[in-house]
Image (cartoon, grey):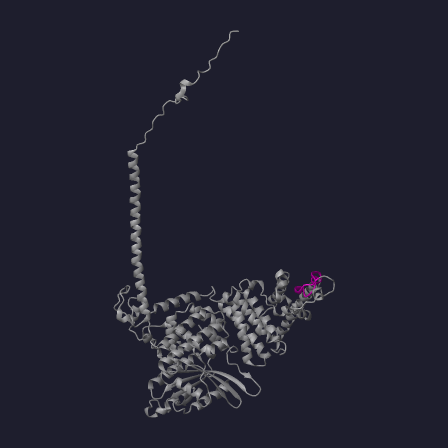
Amino acid sequence: MSQRKERRGIHVDQSELHCNKGCGYYGNAAWQGLCSKCWREEYQRARQKQIQEDWALAEKLQREEEVAYASIQGAQSQPLSQPQAPPQASLAPFSKFEEKKTNEKTRKVTTVKKFFSPSSRTAPKKENQEGKTPSPSISRQSSIETDRVSRDFVDFLKTLHKPGREVHKQSRAFIEIMANKKDLSADELSECVQDFYQNLSDRLMTHFKGSSERVERVMDEVEKYIMTRLYKSVFCPETTDDEEKDLATQNRIRALHWVDIQMLCVPVDEEIPEVSDNVVKAITDVIEMDSKRVPRDKLACITRCSKHIFSAIKITKSEPASADDFLPTLIYIVLKANPPRLQSNIQYITRFCNPSRLMTGEDGYYFTNLCCAVAFIEKLDAQSLNLDPEDFERYMSGQTSPRRPEADGGWPQVDPPTGSAASSPALTQVYQNLDLLSGMGSRQDRVLEGVQSLQRDLITWQESVEREVQEILEKYPLEIRLPAPSAIDSDNVENDRLPPPLTPQVFAG
Amino acid sequence: MGKRTRMRESTGPRSPGPTTPTRDTRTIRAKMVLLGSSGVGKSSLALRFSKDEFKGTLPTVGCAYFTQVVCLSDVTFHFEIWDTAGQEKYHSVTPLYYRGAHAALVVYDISKRESFIRAQMWLRELEKHYIPASTVMVLVGNKGDLSELCQVTLQEGHSLAVDRGLLFMETSAKSGNQVSELMLAIDRPLEGSR
C-alpha cells in the first residue's frame, strides 16, 4: 500500500520506474511496481493464499452456524458478541455460495480489464470482504439500478464495520437462496423474506443492544438491497392471480369514470388553481408508485400523494383535514388516476415490506388508507354514492352520463358550445381535439378525391396514348417492301470505262 | 388481503411495537385507533391530546395521523393515533385500520343518540376481531360540554362499558376536560399488557 502512495506524485524518479524487486527490468504501476515476471510470481502466491483464506472462512462460518443452530435448538442462548448466520441459511447452499464466489473471483482477475481497472489496485483481501461482484446467476439480470443499489448498500455497511460485513454476507447468501426458489408460491416467498427480516433484525437487536432506531435503519437498507434484486422475480409472479386482479380493478375504475366530487362528498374545490395543482400532484404520485422497486419507496409515493391531498383539503376548507375528509378524497384521486398495476403493487408491498412499517408509522397509515380506498372502490354501489340504483346501473353500463343526461350516447356535437365549454379546461380541450379531428376528416376526404381524380386521369391518359399510337399506326401503315435483287456492280456508273475482264488465253504450245 | 398479516399478528412474536428495555425506562410503542361516527369529534379529541397537556407537535398538514410521546415515571409511550373515516359507507373497510392496534377508542357524541347506537355497532365489530384482553378498548362519550343537550346519560355509557368490560370516560375535546385523564387511563393497562 505504501508503495502505491509514493507513485501518486507527479514527479517520477528513474529508479521508481524499475521493478520493485530490483531485478533490473522496468516495473508497471498496474502490477504494483513490479515487472511482469515478478508480478506473476507474486500474484500467484497472493491468489493461492486468498483462496485458502476463503475456504477457511467458509468452513469457519459453517462451524459457527452449526454451533448456532445447536444452541438455538438447545437453550435459545447464544453469545451476544458473535453474530452468526441465520439458521434458515442452510449449510449446503451457503458453502456452495462461497465456492461460487471464489470461482467468480479467480475467473475475473485473469481478465485484462482487471489489470487496468483502478479498483484492482486495492488489496485483494479487501475485495474478498466486500464481494461486490454478484454471482453469475444474479448478475445476468442486474441492471444499472441494481448495481447502484449494491454499491450504496456496501457503502452504507462500511460505516457499520464488523456487523456490516456480516449483514452483507447474509443478504447475498439470502438472494442466492431465493434465486433457487423461483417456483415457490408468492406467499411462501413472502414467508421466506419475512423470516429473513425477522432473523436479521433480531440479531441486530442483540448486537446494537436494543437500539431499535439503528436496527430499523439497517433493516431499511437491507430491504432496499434485497428487494431491488428480487423485484423482477417476485413482483406480480405468475403463480398468483395478481394480474387478473389488476385488470379487474382497472376495468372497474374505468367503468366508474363518471363518479364526480359531489357524489363522493369530497371536500375539494378544483376551481382553485392551487387545489387543482395539488390534486394533479397527488395523482402523479400515486401513479409513480408503480415505477419504484423497493416497497419503502412505493410507500413514500403513497405518503407524498396523501400529503398533497391534505394540502388540497386544507386550502379548500381552510382548516386541517380529518380522516372523514381524507378517505373520500383519496378514493377520488385513485379513481381519477387509475394507477397501473394497483393490486400487484399493494400485494407486493404487503408481502415484502417490513411488517412494522405497514401496521404502524405514518407510511403504514397512508398505505392502510389506500387499501381501504381500493376495497371501497371494489364494493362501491349506488348507496355509497347516494344514487338511485337504477341511475347507478345506467351510468355503469355507459348508457348515460350524469353530467350530460341529454347526450344520447353518441359523440357530442362537433360545433363548440360557446358558453359551457369555457367553464372547464378539459372540455375545451376535448372540443379543440374534436375540431382537429373533423378538420383532419375533411382533409382526408379531399385527399381521397384527389386520389380518385388522379386515377381517372391516369386511365384517360393511358387511353389517349393508346389511341394516338393507333392513329399513327393507321396513318403510316407498315409496308414491307421486298428488296430488289441486287448485284454487286449494279450501282457502279462507270462500268463502261472499266477495262474488260481478263479472259483466259490459251497458248497453243 | 391482510388475512395473512392478521394471522401472523395473533401468533405473537412478529407483532410490531416491541418492548425494548433500556437503562432506566422502557419505551412502549402503541398504536391507537379512533372509531366513531362522523362528527363526534374524533379528530378534535386526537388534536387535543397531541397538542395539549403533553407538549405535542402536529406532524402532518392533516389531522388524521398523530404521534405523541408520553413520559411517565418508568415508561415512555410512543403513541401513534390513527383516525378513521366515520361515515357509514366506509364501515366495511374499517377493519383494515385496526389490525395491529394496541388500543381502540370508540367515540360517541353524548348529544346524539344515534352516535351511541353506532358506537355499539363498532364495539360488536371490534369484538369480532379482538379478544378484549389483548387490546385496550375504551368507550368515550365526547362533547361533555354540551351537557344540556345530553341524549345519552353518563349512566348509560357507564353500564355499557361495564357490560362489555371496557374502560369508560366522558370527555370534552372542546374544553380539554378529562382528555389527559383518558390518556393516563389507557397507559396503565397498556403498560400491564406487555
Residue at left offset 41%, top offset 71%: A284
Residue at left offset 28%, top offset 65%: A412
Question: Does residue A29 belong to the magenta stretch?
Answer: yes
**In this view of the protein, which residue sits in the foreground, A508 or A262?**
A508
Left or right: where does residue B165 sit relative to residue B21? left
* Residue A63 placement (x, y as % from top left): 65, 71
Q: How many marks?
A: 0
Vertical placement of A398 versus A206: above or below?
Answer: above
Question: Does residue A459 belong to the magenta stretch?
Answer: no
Q: Name which quarter of the figure residue B98 lies in.
A: bottom left
Left or right: where does residue A167 sit relative to residue B112? right
* Residue A450 placement (x, y as % from top left): 30, 52
Q: Is residue A378 visible?
A: no
* Residue A82 placement (x, y as % from top left): 63, 76
**Outermost residue toward the front?**
A497
Vertical placement of A303 versus B178: above or below?
Answer: above
Residue at left offset 53%, top offset 72%: A223
- Check the picture and name the quadrant holding the N terminus of chain B: bottom left
Vertical placement of A488 versus B30: above or below?
Answer: above
**Outermost residue toward the left?**
A406
**In this view of the protein, which residue sits in the foreground, A272 or A235?**
A272
Q: Which residues are magenta?
A: A26-40
**Outermost residue toward the top?**
A509
Q: Is residue A131 visible?
A: yes
* Residue B12 placement (x, y as % from top left): 51, 78
**In this view of the protein, which residue sits in the foreground, A7 or A382?**
A7
